[in-house]
Image (cartoon, rainbow, N blue to C red):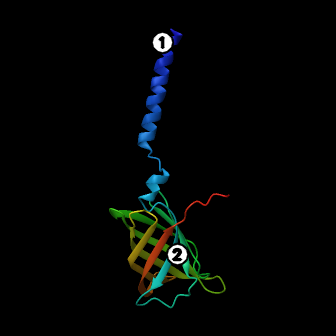
């Protein structure tokens, strides 16, 4: 009797593992290469309405599997941003990020909203955006100014130690 129940326990355990795996899709390294998911180094170039940007101006952005975005910009007056992304087409994504702005004394002065349409290249290692819009809002949410620009991202890869 004991030996008869053992195969059914293994079958049920195997079925449970299969169902859990199917219900909660994993993200392999290869899957990450075909999507925006992952960590990126981003350069931003200005266009109409964009204030002059220094050569060192860039961002680090992490796109999570569940549609979240976390972004840090090399501007000391702008805090870490949080946002959302959605896939719009094959290798194309819409992104919205909100970042808080502070004055030199550290007081909150408003919010920066950045929106972009990103296209990931076929290799999955770079993205570009020729539709990048930013809007600056004061503390009360009133639009102060806006501008457009372009963004280019490069996937951050693992660099194993020698």
Q: Compare residues 58 and 104 and report the one nearer the observer.
A: 58
Residue 127 found in image quarter = bottom left
Q: Residue at x 46, y 29 (%)?
A: 14
Instruction: Classify 43 as above or below 20.
Output: below
Name the residue rendered at 48%, 18% in the picture: 7
Question: Foreground mark, 2 or 1?
Answer: 1
Residue at 46% over, 53% down: 30
Badge 2 marks a residue whose secondary structure is strand
Quadrant, the C terminus: bottom right
Q: Residues within 10 Å of mark 2 (few under 14, many from 20)?
A: many
Q: Nearer the viewer, residue 110 or 36?
A: 36
Q: Dot 2 corresponds to which residue?
A: 99
131 vs 89: above or below = below
Task: Return the x and y of residue 37 as percentages of the image width and height.
Answer: 47, 60
- Provide residue 108's location: percent of width, then percent of height: 59, 81
Q: Which residue is mark 1?
A: 4
Q: Is residue 88 left or right of residue 22?
A: left
How many neighbours does mark 1 have within 10 angstroms: few (below 14), some (14-19), or many (20 or more)? few
């Amino acid at each position: 009797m004991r030996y008869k129940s053992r195969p059914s326990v293994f079958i049920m355990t195997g079925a449970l593992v299969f169902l859990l795996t199917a219900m909660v899709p994993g993200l392999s390294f290869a899957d990450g290469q075909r999507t925006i998911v992952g960590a990126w180094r981003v350069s931003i170039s200005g266009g109409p309405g964009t204030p002059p940007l220094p050569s060192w101006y860039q961002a680090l952005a992490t796109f999570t599997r569940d549609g979240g975005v976390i972004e840090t910009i090399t501007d000391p007056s702008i805090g870490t941003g949080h946002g959302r992304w959605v896939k719009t087409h094959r290798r194309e994504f819409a992104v919205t990020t909100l970042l808080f702005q502070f004055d030199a004394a550290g007081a909150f002065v408003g919010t920066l909203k950045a929106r972009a349409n990103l296209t990931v290249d076929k290799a999955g290692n770079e993205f570009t955006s020729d539709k990048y819009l930013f809007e600056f809002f004061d503390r009360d949410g009133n639009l102060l100014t806006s501008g457009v620009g372009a963004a280019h991202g490069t996937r951050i890869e693992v660099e194993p130690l020698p």
